[in-house]
């Protein structure tokens, strides 16, 4: 019994082409299925042909569905079709002759014809020839016992302050409506040890952040290191997860790493640590599958925030081939590789899919007098992703991110979507309270008789409120303007002060849900699966992953737009209002930084907005 997989729109062919046509009557995990006779493009001559062959016992409108065991491209290559989804399969008694045999090789391609001829011996077989053929057959039998595979490797770099292990440790403390005041004393005590209060307060560290989309994609990525693989399998997968910048699993956060992006838990360090983690997983894989030898590596890379910067730096290092960090740690002569493997880029090693959530390097170098996270001096990081750096590069960009210190690094394929930085990449708690200074604190000297509400400080504070807050006010959300004044000191005894100093602060207090990032988890997963990344389906019954019903239509629109099925996002005004009122976080504020004891450490407004509320964006370099 042979296992096959269904062919869908945009699936690839072994000759480098792709499937161009499918039926809307059969949709599998959001993508239309293809059938016998549907259009397919040849990767060699660029012409359009038809899919030949189909699954005999599965049809749509009377036409057989296309499958890996039963269908080939009708081009001269007769190339096999490669599925992008491996979680829905079918079985045949045997592999049809149409698709049996070796994968397509361009070396055997003849323009306009498929040549398959058996050469006739020029001379009768001599005894020596017979012995030589027997030796060759014995050698081939030995080779057949060695299973050659393409290894899919998923590398996941989490964002600053994001740590999967730490988030999962306290998942019960941050669950929506957890109601710690009603929980048992031992649960209250456990959560309090990590900074969670019965008043709904949470720690300002990696234990106070929910699991990011990078970590959730890591959970979905296939890993065969300790599971059995079929004897006829041509692919296997491994994955590694790199903790977020400035975090330590089970330990206190590295504040220097979080502040600067440097040090032993910084961006470069995470890239350097990746090789050891990959080798560790590879050893487990090889121990459990000693018969397997790797002929090719296909690498998928994901990252969020500074982790996206690490992902880009890692990808560019892999493009160095034999000079890459991983190649130096795992030389071509390693027994895990087939003979002749040489770390040649686009030959032995392919960067397949690079999925980025809102790249923000924010590197600070105090010793070089570089104190600005928002500039384009990124401490030697190689962040540019030129055309062809990978088969597919995608970056989801936070449309509503306005912080001065959160400058974006572009790619050639940016998709701007509603939300702030962590609305895109994840990490916000399921429900959180925003208590924010939404305008720059202002003060002005006024005559003592001037009402505080008519002061220059009051006017400046109102004018500095950002566009998102103004929209919230238009929707009926109240902001509070706090005014106080102090009389000037008397210069002479019994003199009545003529002036006062007026101080104004504008605040907002509201609850926000953390579900918006789940849409972008689905977007990135779908884009990755479309380009061959082996990701499992999302469990819609898992409360931590499921979407609320009021986001269903919005999610469908965003998914359609991001995947190219819609030309515009086209959210209605009501949908935009809903997102802003309930789901989009106001990341930019004038709140002062707090240390672990919740005391001010000076006038440091690291989350302050840009002056014009327009994000700083740097080129793809």
Image: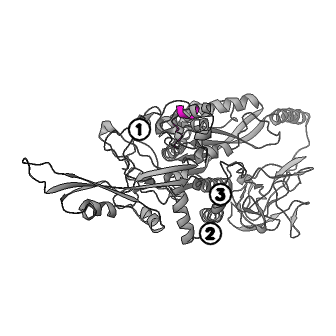
Asked whether disc 1 touches disc 3, contact meaning CB atoms under 8 Å apart, the reply is no
**In front here: 578 or 253?**
578
Q: CA distance from mark 2 to mark 3?
A: 23 Å
Between 608 and 309, the one lying in front of the other is 608
Which of the two discs, 1 and 3, labels the residue nearer the N terminus?
A: 3
How far across and down, in percent of the image, does residue 473 sit? Answer: 44, 65
Q: CA distance from mark 1 to mark 3?
A: 33 Å
Which secondary structure lies at badge 3? loop
| Magenta residues, start to end | 190-200
Residue at image location 46% in from the left, 37% down from the top: 266
Number of the label disc, if any, that sits on residue 533: none
Report x, y in % for residue 219. Answer: 66, 43
Answer whether labels 1 and 2 touch (C-beta < 8 Å). no
Q: Which residue is mark 1?
A: 598
Answer left or right for 476 relative to 250: left
Q: Residue at x 18, y 59 (%)?
A: 448
Q: CA distance from mark 1 to mark 2?
A: 46 Å
Q: Residue at x 34, y 46 (%)?
A: 372
Residue at the spot of label 3: 548
Q: Residue 197 colored magenta?
A: yes
The image quadrant of residue 233 is top right
Residue 161 point in image, percent of width and height? 50, 40
Q: Magenta stretch: residue 32 in it?
A: no
- Relative to residue 67, is residue 501 drawn left or right? left
Classify 10 Å Cα crowding around label 3: few (below 14), some (14-19), many (20 and above): few
Q: Is residue 280 visible?
A: yes
Q: Identify the main secondary structure in magenta.
A: loop
Residue in the image at 41% along x and 41% along y: 380
User: Label 2 neighbourhood size at 10 Å, few (<14), some (14-19), many (20+)?
Assistant: few
Marks 2 and 3, the one that precedes in the sequence: 3
Pointer 2 residue: 566
């Amino acid at each position: 019994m042979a296992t096959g997989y269904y062919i869908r729109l945009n699936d690839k062919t072994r000759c480098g082409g792709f499937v161009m046509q499918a039926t809307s009557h059969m949709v599998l995990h959001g993508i239309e299925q293809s059938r016998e006779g549907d259009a397919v493009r040849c990767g060699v001559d660029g012409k359009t042909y038809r899919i030949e062959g189909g699954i005999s016992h599965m049809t749509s409108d009377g036409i057989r569905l296309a499958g890996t065991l039963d269908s080939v491209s009708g081009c001269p290559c007769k190339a096999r079709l490669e599925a992008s989804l491996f979680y829905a399969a079918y079985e045949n008694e045997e592999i049809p002759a149409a698709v049996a045999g070796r994968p397509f090789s361009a070396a055997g391609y003849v323009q306009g014809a498929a040549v398959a001829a058996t050469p006739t011996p020029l001379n009768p077989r001599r005894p020596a020839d017979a012995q030589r053929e027997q030796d060759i057959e014995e050698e081939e039998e030995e080779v057949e016992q060695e299973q050659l595979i393409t290894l899919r490797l998923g590398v996941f770099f989490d964002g600053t302050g994001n740590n999967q292990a730490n988030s999962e440790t306290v998942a019960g403390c941050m669950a929506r409506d957890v109601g710690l005041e009603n929980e048992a004393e031992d649960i209250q005590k456990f959560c309090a040890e990590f900074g969670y209060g019965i008043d709904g307060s949470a720690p300002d560290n990696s234990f106070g952040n929910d699991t990011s989309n990078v970590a959730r994609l890591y959970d979905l990525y296939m890993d065969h290191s300790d599971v059995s693989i079929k004897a006829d399998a041509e692919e296997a997968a491994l994955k590694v997860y790199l903790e977020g910048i400035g975090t330590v699993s089970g330990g206190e956060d590295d504040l220097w790493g979080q502040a600067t992006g440097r040090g032993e838990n910084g961006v470069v360090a995470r890239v350097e640590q990746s090789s050891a983690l990959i080798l560790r997983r590879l050893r487990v894989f090889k121990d459990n599958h000693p018969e397997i030898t790797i002929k090719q590596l296909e690498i998928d890379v994901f990252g969020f925030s500074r982790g996206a910067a690490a992902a880009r730096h890692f990808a560019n290092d892999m493009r160095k081939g034999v000079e890459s960090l991983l190649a130096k740690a795992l030389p071509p002569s390693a027994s895990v590789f087939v003979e002749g493997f040489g770390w040649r880029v686009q030959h032995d090693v392919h960067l397949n899919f690079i999925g980025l959530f809102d790249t923000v390097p924010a590197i600070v170098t105090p010793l070089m007098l570089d104190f600005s996270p928002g500039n384009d001096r990124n401490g030697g990081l190689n962040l540019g992703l030129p055309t062809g750096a990978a088969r597919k590069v995608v970056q989801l960009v936070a449309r509503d991110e306005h912080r001065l210190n959160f400058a974006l690094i572009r790619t050639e394929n940016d998709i701007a979507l509603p939300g702030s930085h962590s609305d895109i990449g994840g990490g916000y708690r399921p429900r959180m309270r925003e208590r924010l200074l939404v305008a720059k604190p202002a003060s002005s000297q006024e005559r003592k008789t001037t009402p505080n509400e008519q002061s220059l400080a009051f006017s400046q504070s109102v004018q500095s409120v950002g566009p998102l807050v103004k929209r919230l006010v238009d929707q009926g959300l109240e902001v509070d303007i706090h005014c106080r004044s102090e009389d000037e000191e008397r210069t002479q005894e019994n003199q009545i002060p003529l002036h006062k100093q007026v101080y104004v602060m504008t605040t907002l207090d509201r609850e926000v849900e953390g579900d918006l990032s789940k849409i972008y988890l689905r977007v990135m997963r779908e884009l990755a699966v479309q380009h061959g990344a082996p990701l499992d389906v999302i469990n819609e019954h898992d409360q931590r992953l499921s979407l609320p019903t009021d986001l269903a239509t919005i999610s469908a629109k965003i998914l359609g737009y991001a995947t190219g099925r819609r030309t515009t996002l086209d959210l209605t005004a009501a949908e935009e209002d809903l997102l802003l009122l309930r789901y989009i976080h106001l990341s930019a504020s004038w709140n002062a930084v707090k240390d672990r004891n919740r005391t001010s450490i000076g006038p440091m407004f690291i989350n302050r907005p840009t002056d014009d509320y327009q994000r700083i964006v740097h080129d793809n370099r």
